[in-house]
Image (cartoon, rainbow, N blue to C red):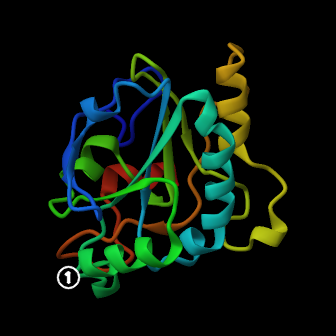
Amino acid sequence: MTFTLQIGDQAPEFALPATDGKTYRLSDFNEAKVLVVFFSCNHCPFVTGSDEATRQTAEQFASQGVQFVAINSNSVNTYPEDSFDHMVERMSTHRFPWLYLHDQSQQVALAYGALRTPHFYVFDAARKLVYTGRGVDNPRDASQITVNDLENALREHLAGEPITTPMTNPIGCNVKWDGQDAHWMPPEACDLV
């Protein structure tokens, strides 16, 4: 059994609090033609380096029924900067065009098989996985981006075409698992990176 979701898998359910004070479930996004769930955090240089590229992609496809939802699953015990209060502050400062949910138990990260921040999952209208992996090829330095895999996948999917590259390795910091060293990853995930 693989650690991360595979193409064609159903989106796992969740019920998580967001920085806007509400709790969201997968069913709250039923109206979206495409749902992009991505694992993010407050501090990772690969997240902060590609935030604006992700913003541009989210804004570009919003009118076509694509909704973005970010989830922070990092343990505050492992990395204090990833606290919920810092999440609220980050959204207030940057006003990203997505909801920012907190997975304190890390159960959602495990259900999706989140490997890194950022790690993107694109689900179709039936909430089947059609793309997973990186957003861009150089998330740490936006000036060096040459390929936007997320944008390519969304464009092809919305055009009714097969996605040329449906799975890539996410590039970023590993998820900070509670009670583990900051660089630890589940053993079953280690053959994927």
Picture residue at 18% right of the left edge, 64% below the top: 104
Residue marked by disc 1: 77
Residue 62 visible, this angle: yes
Instruction: Give residue 84's position: percent from left, percent from top.
Output: 25, 74
Identify the image quadrant of residue 66. top right
Q: Nearer the viewer, residue 141 or 86?
A: 86
Picture residue at 29% right of the left edge, 80% below the top: 181
Residue 165 visible, this angle: no
Where's the N terminus, which quadrant? top left
Picture residue at 71% right of the left edge, 15% below the top: 161
Instruction: Give residue 146's position: percent from left, percent from top.
Output: 84, 56
Instruction: Give residue 102's position: percent from left, percent from top.
Output: 26, 61
Q: Determine whether 77 is above or below 117 in the image.
A: below
Identify the image quadrant of residue 46. bottom right
Q: Residues within 10 Å of mark 1 (few under 14, many from 20)?
A: some
Instruction: Give residue 111's position: percent from left, percent from top.
Output: 26, 42
Q: Determine whether 42 is above or below 28 in the image.
A: below
Taking the image as shown, residue 70 lies to the left or right of residue 186, namely right
Q: Determine whether 67 is above or below 181 in the image.
A: above
Identify the image quadrant of residue 62. top right
Picture residue at 82% right of the left edge, 71% below the top: 143
Three-letter code for the amino acid on which mark 1 is drawn = Asn
Q: SS at mark 1? A: loop
